[in-house]
Amino acid sequence: MALLEIRGLTVEYSSGGYAARPIEDFDLDLESGQLVLLLGASGCGKTTLLSVLAGILTPAAGTARFDGIDIIGLRGAALTAYRRRTVGIVFQAFNLVPSLSARENVEVPLRAAGTGRAEARRRADELLERVDLGHRIKHRPADMSGGQQQRVAIARALAHDPPLVLADEPTAHLDYIQVEGVITLLREIARPGRVVVIATHDERLIPLADRVVELTPHAASPSRGPERRELQAGEVLFRQGDEGDLVYVVEAGRIEIVMERVGGDEELVNVLEPGGYFGELAPMFRLRRSATARAQGPATVVAYGLTQFRELQTSDSTPGPNSSLLT
Amino acid sequence: MWLLGLRDLQWRRRRFLIAVLATSIVFALTLLLAGASSGLKNEGRRIVGSFGADAWLVAKGTSGPFTASTVLPEDTAREVAALPGVRRADPVVLLRSSVDDGSLRDVNVIGYRQGGIGTPTVVDGRLPRRDGEVVADTRLGVDPGEKVRVNGLQMQVVGTAEGITYAFGTPTIVMPLRDAQELVYAGQPLASAIVTRGVPDSVPADLKVLRDDEVRKDLERPAKSGNETIDFLNVLLWLVAAGIIGSLVYVSALERVRDFAVLKATGVASRTLLGVLMIQSVFLSVAAALVAAVFAQLLKPSFPFEVSIEASAYVSLVVIALLVGFVASLVGLRRAVGVDPALAFGGA
């Protein structure tokens, strides 16, 4: 059985009143000892997934189990215990408490869990030695480089020797020299009995991962040729949240663009007439569709790959100004 | 987890120091105001007690000897002395006047029968032996041998006395009865009141008997609204102190939102964070109270009237400081409780 099991995970939140689902119907199994990369661009749901695994965010649907613990169902003291002892988190911006020394930052989760002062100090010193910062234990974050701060953050995450370590963009604020030390350290902490999940868009980490999970939608070949599609009245061309790799031009009929609001209501955003185009953002930025496209009546659309569409824009038959930038 | 609070205080020490100083000034004002109120009450107690009288007889309808201007014939003392229960009776004159020593200063004037009730206790010099000699309040700032012009009359200071200041710190000049009668009654044999040793069993219908506490209350009556104002001001000042500390704690909580989010995300309980904020707030408030005690002592001598800060006022201030700190922490507590640990994720 996998140490970490995720089934049908869907996270929904309100973005300006509209429903956004960075993660929808997501499945994942991770084994003990694995170092896993969650790879993807900003906004693809990496941090959202980490928040769910950290017990900080409650999803709209789905389950997440770690070593038999139902993370989603945790509440109160059980949730606090999970955050203290089961999961260790390395944050993107280090997030060390600026008024505390390196040693005190590592001691915080230990003292919070009731560890005595002497034992907490001993453990903090041991961890800081392990991350090669034994000579900086009394220094405050402001007196340390980015790489050193991140190593303190890793030491803090390991305070309770947690079986699940989550790292959110651990190399984001580091120069190329500092990155090397952090990458090496992250590789070392993945061991049997522990899963290390790293959310990143830094492809330099790919070689050290046991597994890479891409959260960014796959783009189809940008040179994909035009495809004509006939739509019945009310037929949905694509839905909000779908992966998208084609740009559409309306040839006949009318296409309505609607966005789903929090609570399930729809809001009509635009209606496109012949000559208008829509859906270019998803393939361009490898995002999911941010709205639903639906035929108002019988309609015909022509679908283009991104390259084809760009060629079309620069040719004499450029589509008219009636376009929707939302999709 | 007190370490979190202590380290934050060290980290932001300059800001907290300013807040402590500002709050300590406010607390010092409350101590000084309380001391002023006590001082006024002490004045009344001391001057009335200095006579050593068992009873005060005034004209019927008079509220008290120090506040009314009604007079009695000096001879009334002889009649009173003959009343059952009275061992001795002496007339006294109590009035307000002024001294001109280059600048005009208000003074109280007490006229007493030499050797009788109301004879002052001198701390320097001697008692008057003849007309034109006076005992001056040490607060007047004149020494034996100097001259003072009281209501236009030149007087010789032969002695000084303490504890005879009253009426909002107005110094007093004590003189023989004749001189006082000359000063205000054009020499007529009149008196403000008759003071006795022993309490008369009954008095003539045109007289009223007052005991020391009644005379003192009457003397304090003009200051009553002043004392109520002082109490009201004190409450406002405590609110100001709570506002200073509360605003600082709130701003500090706003700046530490991400810290709180990280701490919560790593398993620190919300109640621990609440405790940290509360301890910080109470610490600041109590520290301000202690500094205020020093400020008050330094500022006390600058007041023109007596400021008597009693030990109970210091104890009360510490208790109030604890309460102020607790109340002030509530504004920050709400902020800390509401922090979403998800904020810990995300860029700087």
Image: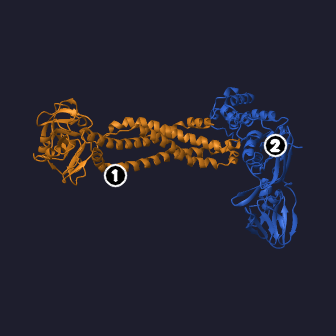
Chain colours: A blue, B orange
Q: Position of residue B174 (x, y in %)?
A: 19, 38
Outermost left residue: B187
Dot label at residue A37: 2
> Where does the image place residue A40, in percent across and percent down from the top left?
79, 48
- Chain at numbered mark 1: B
- Secondary structure of residue under mark 1: helix
Q: Amino acid at mark 1?
A: Ser
Instruction: Residue B108: tell me if it is visible.
Output: no
- From the viewer's side, name the closer residue of A178 and A100: A100
Q: Residue furthest top?
A: A135
Amino acid tagged 2: Leu
Q: Please, what secondary structure does the residue beneath circle 2 have?
A: strand
Q: Which residue is mark 1?
A: B225
Q: Nearer the viewer, residue B159 or A160?
A: B159
| Residue A299 x, y percent position in the rendering | 83, 71
On the same chain, marks 2 and 1? The answer is no
Residue B333 lies, with reference to residue A266, above or below; the image says above
